[in-house]
């Protein structure tokens, strides 16, 4: 379970992400999201990829409709390097950055802790910008763990 010191506030830079983006029904997420990763990973690194980091982006969440837009992506150095993939430009923003400790299968527990415990106690508010999971160079796809952060956009 995450702890208070697993969260830091950081100014995130603008990023140009390219990859696969789909509207996903929440009930189908356990099968659709891993399939999206399986489609993207063999093509990585993409032309113009900035670093060996991958992103899982959450956008346009519709709780009432039971769906959201999900994107599996990498960062590229310029926006014209989409190479036939979907493109998303993230604007610079303040973020609450949660270090996730454990396998990717336990990300839901970190999200629950953030929304149920940290966010209400913090006095902070989320902005409408996308949130994202950042899988850094130390992430091990075999064990599905290590070097994972969740970036939640904050109102300033």
Image: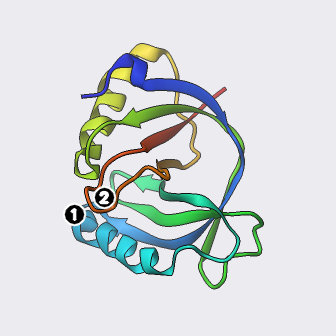
In this orientation, which residue lies closer to the viewer: 92 or 156?
Answer: 92
Q: Horizontally, is 112 left or right of 36 in the view?
A: left
Mark 1 or mark 2, earlier in chain: 1
Which label was assigned to residue 148? none
Alpha-carbon distance for marks 1 and 2?
Answer: 8 Å
Answer yes or no: do the residues labelled 1 and 2 have beta carbons within 8 Å? Answer: yes
Q: Is mark 2 on a helix, strand or loop?
A: loop
Residue at (41, 18) in percent of width and height? 5
Q: Residue 4: x and y, percent? A: 38, 17
Within 10 Å of the Cα at label 1, are there few (<14), some (14-19), or many (20+) other Cα atoms? few
Residue at (29, 56) in percent of width and height? 144
Residue at (57, 43) in percent of width and height? 128
In this orientation, which residue lies closer to the viewer: 96 or 139?
Answer: 139
Q: Residue 120: x and y, percent? A: 39, 19
Q: Residue 141: x and y, percent? A: 33, 61
76 up-or-down from 82: above or below: above
Q: In which quarter of the image is the N terminus?
A: top left
Q: How many marks?
A: 2
Q: Mark 1 points at which residue?
A: 27
1 up-or-down from 153: above or below: above
Q: Is mark 1 on a helix, strand or loop?
A: helix
Q: Quadrant of residue 40?
A: bottom left
Q: Residue 99: x and y, percent? A: 41, 34
Residue depth check, mark 1 versus mark 2: number of the one nearer the observer? 1
Q: Mark 2 points at which residue?
A: 66
4 up-or-down from 90: above or below: above
22 up-or-down from 2: above or below: below
Residue at (43, 74) in percent of width and height? 41
Q: Horizontally, is 89 left or right of 112 in the view?
A: right
Within 10 Å of the Cα at label 2, are there few (<14), some (14-19), or many (20+) other Cα atoms? few
Q: Quadrant of residue 30?
A: bottom left
In this orientation, which residue lies closer to the viewer: 53 or 126?
Answer: 53
């Amino acid at each position: 379970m995450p702890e208070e010191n697993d969260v830091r506030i950081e100014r995130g830079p603008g990023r140009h992400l390219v990859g696969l983006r789909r509207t996903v029904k929440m009930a189908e997420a356990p099968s659709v999201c891993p399939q999206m990763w399986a489609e993207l990973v063999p093509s990585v690194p993409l032309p113009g990829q900035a670093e060996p980091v991958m992103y899982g982006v959450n956008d346009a969440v519709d709780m009432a409709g039971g769906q959201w837009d999900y994107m599996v992506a990498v960062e590229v150095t310029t926006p014209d390097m989409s190479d036939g993939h979907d493109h998303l430009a993230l604007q610079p923003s303040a973020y609450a950055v949660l270090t996730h400790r454990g396998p990717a299968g336990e990300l839901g527990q970190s999200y629950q802790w953030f929304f149920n415990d940290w966010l209400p106690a913090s006095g902070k508010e989320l902005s409408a910008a996308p949130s994202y999971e950042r899988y850094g160079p130390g992430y091990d796809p075999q064990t599905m763990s290590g070097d994972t952060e969740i970036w939640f956009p904050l109102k300033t």
